[in-house]
Image (cartoon, helix red, strand yellow):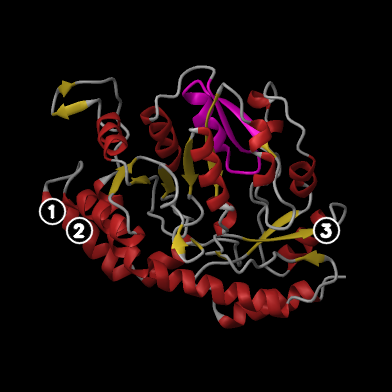
Amino acid sequence: MLYFANPKSEYIFLKKKIDKKIIKVLNSNSYILGNEVKTFEKNFSNYLGIKYSIGVSSGTDALILSLKSLNIKAGDEIITTSHTAYATIAAIVEVGGIPKFIDIKENDFTMDVSKVTSMINKKTRGIIAVHIYGNPVDIEDLVKISKKNKIFLIEDCSQAHGAEYKNKKVGTFGNVACFSLYPTKNLGGFGDGGIISTNDKSIYRKIKLLREYGWKEKNKAIIHGINNRLDEIQAGILNVKIKFLDKFNKKRKIIAKKYLKEIKSKHLLLPEINKNKKSVYHLFVVRINKNLRSKFINYLKTKNITCGIHYPIPNHRQKPYLKFKSNLLITEKISKEIISLPIYPMLKSNEINSIIKSINNFK
């Protein structure tokens, strides 16, 4: 069976290195915020070309801690998209914020930046820009808008490790950037994890306090905080995998290029390419007529190909968030049409060819 993501295949490829690293951590007698976490934070900062990185317990917690570091209060409005992982909205609501949903562009599923300014009011505190599916949002425009209106900009880079906008890595544009390290991500461990990056020293210092009980030193809290630490074993695994991130992203791009060139099905609408954006194809998302989607997915299952749907129910249609009333025509339209095709670094040439052939043979 070919899945749309397969993190186990990365483990098999890196098994000796990962097993060696895990054993090293287990023998170190240092299991919480030890050398592996410190090293990964340094490695990640160096990879992005940014000053500070803080390892945390998940991508969701990365967003929550970032919002807390920016002093979000109950009733503060945060502009973002509904077409994103549930975590983006859950984090806003968790800190008492109110998500204000912007519709997306039909051609690449990213935030329609042209609609942001009209949404800003006295209650607006910031924007969470989601680089969806590995494809950068129009981030330079959002930087200008946030500075002009004196509101913060958080980049949700959970699907975009290594993606670039005008040859600059995403995660380096906003006040703070959040990354998930979930197993299926372009850079993922084999459990939960996340990391926050920033060039702002005050944000860095506050998040470091927030992730471990508000402690300035052990057992001496100066602010309220809880346990949101990155696990030492996961950090060790990530220190192995970050060395292969560019190689794995390159493979994703090769697969995407082949899909774009060789998928000829009249039923599918393929993603568009923007010269200013270098996607890392966390997902390869196509569109199909909503009346054909189930038929197409079931057809591929008969060929031992499993697709995904990201995301079948937009967040503004989720029960807990119905109170945040929104009119998002494009978001709702594409949610009924999208399909995520298999794309991960360990896909073999014959498997890619088989996927393309099966798609092209769909009637």
Where does label 3 land, which residue? Answer: 295
Residue 87 visible in the displayed image = no
Q: Residue at x 27, y 59 (%)?
A: 43
Q: Which quadrant of the rendered structure holds the C terminus?
A: bottom right
Snapshot quadrant of residue 351: bottom right
Furthest-front residue in view? Answer: 148
In the image, 195 versus 16, the foreground residue is 195
Snapshot quadrant of residue 255: bottom right
Q: Residue at x 31, y 51 (%)?
A: 234
Where does label 2 land, which residue? Answer: 23
Left or right, residue 311 beside residue 145: right
Q: Residue 319, image x and y in percent? A: 68, 26
Q: So how many labels did they put on this image?
A: 3
Contact flag, marks 1 and 3 (Cβ < 8 Å):
no
Furthest-top residue in view? Answer: 74
Q: Which residues are magenta?
A: 76-101
Give the spatial CA distance, label 1 vs label 3. 52 Å
Q: Residue 109, image x and y in percent? A: 67, 52
Where does label 1 land, which residue? Answer: 27
Looking at marks 1 and 3 on the same chain, the residue that comes earlier in the sequence is marked by: 1
Snapshot quadrant of residue 327: top right
In the image, 188 versus 8, the foreground residue is 188
Looking at marks 2 and 3 on the same chain, the residue that comes earlier in the sequence is marked by: 2
Asked whether residue 92 is drawn in magenta, I would say yes
Q: Residue 150, image x and y in percent? A: 48, 33
Contact flag, marks 2 and 1 (Cβ < 8 Å):
yes
Q: Amino acid at mark 2?
A: Ile
